[in-house]
Structure formats: structure tokens, C-alpha cells
Image (cartoon, coloured by chain):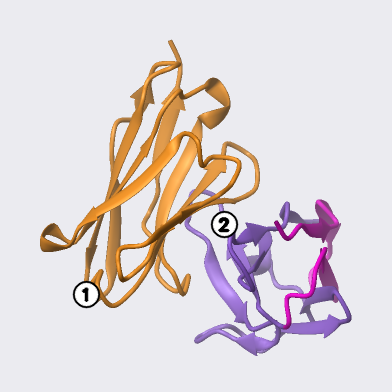
Chain colours: A purple, B orange
Amino acid sequence: DIQMTQSPSSMSASLGDRVTITCQASQDIGNNLIWFQQKPGKSPRPMIYYATNLANGVPSRFSGSRSGSDYSLTISSLESEDMADYHCLQYKQYPRTFGGGTKLELK
Amino acid sequence: QVQLTESGPGLVHPSETLSLTCTVSGFSLTGYSVYWVRQPSGKGLEWMGRMRYNGDTSYNSALKSRLSISRDTSKNQVFLKMNSLQTDDTGTYYCTRASFDYWGQGVMVTVSS
């Protein structure tokens, strides 16, 4: 199975900060990665598909990038509504596997 | 519009079998695959398995011995059955379309005596 190592597991940041969350894949997944946002009591919401493509309706302050086996989600200027948990998922092969998640809190 | 709705018991006793139903609307189960995903309370997400559009299934290897996914296309329903439940199976269970664009609201399952 492909392991997705996500970091950090939690972080606190201030409004307006630039925030980056990373997932490292244990095997080549191409760009077959999704980033999800999840707020308390809600289902996950896909934010970025295929590592770099914004999902419909997602603000442009969100972006995705890749460097080798490392995939990153960046929020360019943090807003209060961005406080949530973030998860990565690889869909290169079965079983699909998620990263461990990142809890993003306000400093 | 596309909707997925999970249903099932909120409480299951240890060693018993969990049975959940995902009822879909707005798309056909013969055209789209459906996944089950779970989330232990306060923890991350875990992909459990899939019902492919052609009726094939695949499972998370860690759950494979306990898990079964089936469907009834005439009722637009996908079923999950997992046996030998333990307390660490407590959490929220979701069904989602395989493109992850639409999710159910989730059903909370507590395993307790």
C-alpha cells in the first residue's frame, strides 16, 4: 500500500499568514492527489484535484504544488474561514490512502 | 441533484456486525463507483472499500477479512457489512462518490457494551 506522510499534524497561524501543509508519498503517485478541507461535524470537501487543480468554488488563495514525492497545499493569506482540518489522499492505486491530517488553528 | 445518505444503527455491541446503507440519488450506481470512508473520533480518514460501477469490489487490506460491500441497483443502495466490531471501530462512516465530489453527511457509529 502507498503510505502518505502528512506534516505537520497540527499548526497554529495568524490571519494573513502564508501556510503550507505537505504530504510525502512512499511511492510514485504521479499527480494523483486530492487535498480536502474538513470542518467540525462536516464531511470532507475537495479543494484541489490532481495535485494542482482548484476544485469548483475554491478561493484562489489556495494552491497545490509538487516537488518530487512531496505534495504541498498552500494558503497564501489565511482567513478565519480556513480554520479546519486538511487531509491529502492518493488515488494512484488501490487501496486509496489518506495522510494523517493537519489541524489548522488560529494563533 | 446528487445526494448520498448513510443510514444505520448508532450503537453496536462489541463482536457484533455493523450494517450500513448508502442511498444515492441524482446518479446511477451502474455509471459511478461508490466508496466507504470512515473516521475514528478525533482522528484521520480511512478508505474502507469500493463498489465499482460494474459490481466489482475492492477493500482496504487491513479490513478485508471483516468487510463486505454489496449493492442493490434497483433501490440505488450500496451496503456495508463489517463483522467482529471492536471499540476502535467507533467513529463516523461516510459514503462518497468515487470522484470524491459528493459525500454523505456521515453516520456516527459507537461500539460499546
The residue where tag 2 is placed is A39
Secondary-structure class at tag 1: loop
In front of the other: B110 or B56: B56
Name the outermost residue toward the left.
Answer: B74
Residue drawn at (61%, 87%) of the image: A54
Q: Is residue A10 magenta?
A: yes
The quarter of the rendered structure image containing the N terminus of chain A is: bottom right
The residue where tag 1 is placed is B26
Q: Is residue B110 above or below residue A65?
A: above
Secondary-structure class at tag 2: loop
The quarter of the rendered structure image containing the C terminus of chain A is: bottom right
Residue A64 relative to residue B19: left or right:
right
The residues colored magenta run A1-30
Q: Is residue A16 visible?
A: no
Q: Is residue A37 above or below residue B90?
A: below
Residue drawn at (50%, 87%) of the image: A56
Q: Which x, y percent locates residue A29?
A: 73, 75
Mark 1 Cα shell of 10 Å, populated few (<14), some (14-19), many (≥20): few
- The amino acid marked with disc number 2 is Lys
Q: Which picture quadrant has residue A25? A: bottom right
Mark 2 Cα shell of 10 Å, populated few (<14), some (14-19), many (≥20): some
Numbered badge on residue B62: none
Q: Are marks 1 and 2 on the same chain?
A: no
Residue A80 relative to residue B96: left or right:
right
